[in-house]
Image: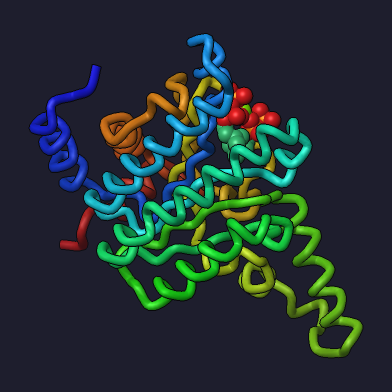
Amino acid sequence: MPQAPQTLELLEQEVRLHPVPAHVAIIMDGNGRWAEARGRSRVEGHREGSLSVRDVTRCARRVGIKALTLYAFSAQNWARPLTEVHALMDLLREYLESERAEILENGIRLHAVGDLDRLPGSVRGPLERLRADSAANTGMLLTLALSYGGQEELVDAARRLAEKVRAGKLEPSRLDAAAFHAELPTALLPQVDLLIRTSGEQRTSNFLPWQLAYAELLFVDTPWPEFRAQDLVRCLRGYQGRERRFGLTGAQVRSERVPPA
Ligand code: IPE
Ligand code: IPE
Ligand code: MG
C-alpha cells in the first residue's frame, strides 16, 4: 500500500539526521517476473519499473545522495529476445525525453557508462544531448549503466594501459590503484558506498566490480516495479545501522569516530 506522503517526509528527515551514503548503486531487477506473476507482458514490468526510477531518483536527491548509479541494461542483456530489447530501448528513449526537464531544473548531472556505441541512435541522441546540457550541474550525479559490463570495462582499461606501456608513456612499476582507476571508462564514478539489488537475487551480475570493492551490499526481495521512495529510505536506514570497517577493528573504527578531547 502506498505510504502517506507525511510518513515518507518524516522517514526522509530521519535519514538526513545520520550519514547518508555518498554513492548508491542499484541493480534494478525483477521487472519481468513481477509482470509475469500478474499475467502481464515483461515489457509492462519494464514500463512500471521506469516509474520506480523516477520516484527513487527524486527521493535520492531529496535526502542528499551525491551519486546514484542505476544498472538499466547490461552488456549481456543484448542476448534477450529482440522484441524485449527493442521495447527496452523505446522505454529508455521515452525516459530520457520525459525526464529531461526535471533533470535540468533540479541541477542533476546525467551521465552514462557502458558500450554506448551499441545503443540505437534514437537513444544515443537524447542521451548525448542531456549529458552535454547537464554537464555543469552539481546537484546529484545520476549515472545510467547502459550496455554495461564490468569485466568488459576492466579489460578495456587493461588494454589502454598496455598501449601506454608499449608507447613508453607508462612505467609498469608506477601503476597503482589510483592510476588504474583513472584509466577506467567509469573513472568519474567514486567508490560505491551502498549497493542495492531488488527482487531477491544475491549476485552482482557484472556490475561495477572495481567500485564495489568495499560497498555495503543490500539484497531486498521487493521487485523493482514495486520499489519506491519509502523502500529506498528503508535501505538507507539499514545502511546507517552498519559498521564499515575497511580492514580495521571495530574498536579502531569506533575510537576514530570520537572527536579528540
Ligand atoms: C531488470 O528486470 C531489467 C533488466 C535487466 C533490463 P529483468 O528484466 O531482469 O526482470 P527478471 O529478473 O527477469 O524478473
Ligand atoms: C542485471 O539483471 C542487469 C540489470 C538489472 C540491468 P539481469 O536480470 O540481467 O541479471 P542476471 O542475468 O539475472 O544475473
Ligand atoms: Mg533479472
Image position, residue 64 (x, y; %):
26, 55
Q: Which residue is drawn at 35% across and 44% down?
A: 54
56 or 181, which is in the foreground? Answer: 56
Compared to 255, does 9 lie above or below?
Answer: above
Q: Which residue is drawn at 78% across and 37% down?
A: 79
Figure quadrant of residue 2:
top left
Residue 253 appears in view: yes
Answer with left or right where residue 99 lies relative to residue 206: left
Q: Which residue is drawn at 60% across and 57% down?
A: 122
Answer with left or right where residue 41 lies relative to residue 103: right
Q: Residue at x 38, y 39 (%)?
A: 243
Residue 241 appears in view: no
Image position, residue 149 (x, y; %):
70, 49
How many numbered dots are placed on residues in this image?
0
86 or 184, which is in the foreground? Answer: 86
181 or 150, which is in the foreground? Answer: 150
Compared to 96, does 169 lie above or below?
Answer: below
The colour scheme of the drawn protein is: rainbow
Figure quadrant of residue 107:
bottom left
Figure quadrant of residue 173:
bottom right
Answer with left or right where residue 60 lies relative to residue 217: left
State which quarter of the image contains the C terminus: bottom left
Residue at the left extreme of this rendering: 6
Image position, residue 133 (x, y; %):
42, 74
Compared to 223, does 98 lie above or below?
Answer: below
Residue at the right extreme of this rendering: 166
Picture quarter with ligand 3: top right
Image position, residue 41 (x, y; %):
57, 20
State which quarter of the image contains the N terminus: top left
